[in-house]
Amino acid sequence: MTIPYMKIRLIELFAGVGSQAMALRDIGADFEHWRVVESDKYAVRSYNAIHGTDFETTDIRNVRGADLGIVDVEKFTYLLTYSFPCQDLSLAGKQLGMTKGSGTRSGLLWEVERLLNETENLPQVLLMENVPQVHGSKNIDDFNLWIDFLRSKGYSNFWQDLNAKDYGVAQNRKRCFMVSILGDAAYEFPKPVKLTKRMKDYLEDEVDEKYYLKSEKADRLIADLESRGILDGKEKVTCDGTTNKPKEIGVMNCIKARYDAGITSFQSEGGRLSNVSDEQKSNRKNRQ
């Protein structure tokens, strides 16, 4: 099945600040912001400020299928995104799961099932993004149940784990994506591309001293980097931010939930971004 070109009407469930809309904007897609469903009032304010829209805060549990406004499907391609909460799936959380009726935040996935059952016209394309644990051993039964539901509605489904570092971003961030196309369809995920950026490419040349880390851990980190010659003659260095054998890095680890924006002594949690300037090194020596 080939979907003919039609203007996209974008429906974002669990919209956040509209990262899916940003992606469509950045690739030059012809689309309009059709519906936004997001319960965080601050996220909605940010969404409106970023995209020039005027959406209101909405709880998905109070939305009905007719509210999605899927009409004139012969004239428009309706793209529905549903990157539902990952807190109860992520390894950084309590892993309470996404079972239907569980009442967990990740269990809000099944509100999407309800909405699709309530709509007279189904969106032609669905897009999901979530942590890889969505299909992990603890959640695979629910994941397969979800796919079975989508098949029953007539969708062809394609999912794969993709890593940001394979698509031009210097961050080791793996996520599961699923594309569902109404009808008998084929889809291939994009092939990885060579990474040309490193973390130091994102660093600013001038950073106000108020952003410097001033602590015993910071001193230990800088001292260790200096002793191992990592800082010698380099204007900008990106290090992993751990006091346990710190090293220079080109690709950032994925930022975890409950991120403390500081320096850790656990090597497994390394990956903080550190812009160690000559001024900061000098300040450290002056405090000794």
Image (cartoon, rainbow, N blue to C red):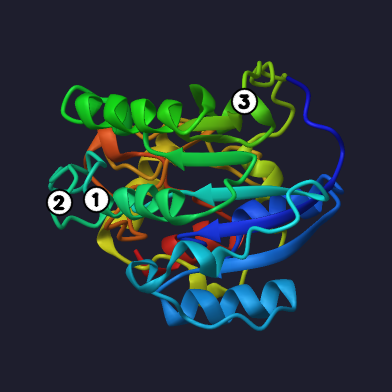
Q: Is residue 61 visible?
A: yes
Q: Nearer the viewer, mark 2 or mark 3?
A: 3
Depth check, mark 1 against mark 2: the one in front is: 2
* 108 displayed left or right of 37: left
- Total marks drawn? 3
Q: Is residue 160 above or below residue 225?
A: above
Name the quadrant containing residue 199.
top right
The quadrant of the picture occupied by the N terminus is: top right
Q: Residue at x 36, y 32 (%)?
A: 149
Q: Give the quadrant of the C terminus.
A: bottom left
Q: Nearer the viewer, residue 141 or 117?
A: 117
- Looking at the rendered structure, the secondary structure element under dot 2 is loop
Amino acid type, callout 1: Gly
Which of disc 3 and disc 1 is earlier in sequence?
A: 1
In the rendering, which numbered label is found on residue 183?
3
Kindly identify which residue carries mark 1: 107
Looking at the rendered structure, the secondary structure element under dot 1 is: helix
Q: Please name the residue that numbered disc 2 is placed on.
A: 101
Amino acid carrying mark 3 in the image: Gly
Give how far apart the Cα atoms at labels 2 and 3 are: 29 Å
Answer whether labels 2 and 3 touch (C-beta < 8 Å).
no
In x, y percent, where is residue 198? 65, 34
Q: Which mark is residue 271?
A: none
The residue positioned 50% from the left and 55% from the top of the image is 119
Looking at the rendered structure, the kind of residue marked 2 is Gly
Neighbourhood count class around disc 2 (C-alpha, 10 Å): few under 14, some 14–19, many 20 upward: few
Q: Quadrant of residue 4?
A: top right
Q: Is residue 238 left or right of residue 136?
A: right
Mark pair 1, 2: CA separation = 7 Å
Residue 237: % across, % down: 58, 43
- How far across and how far down the image is residue 271, in percent? 41, 40
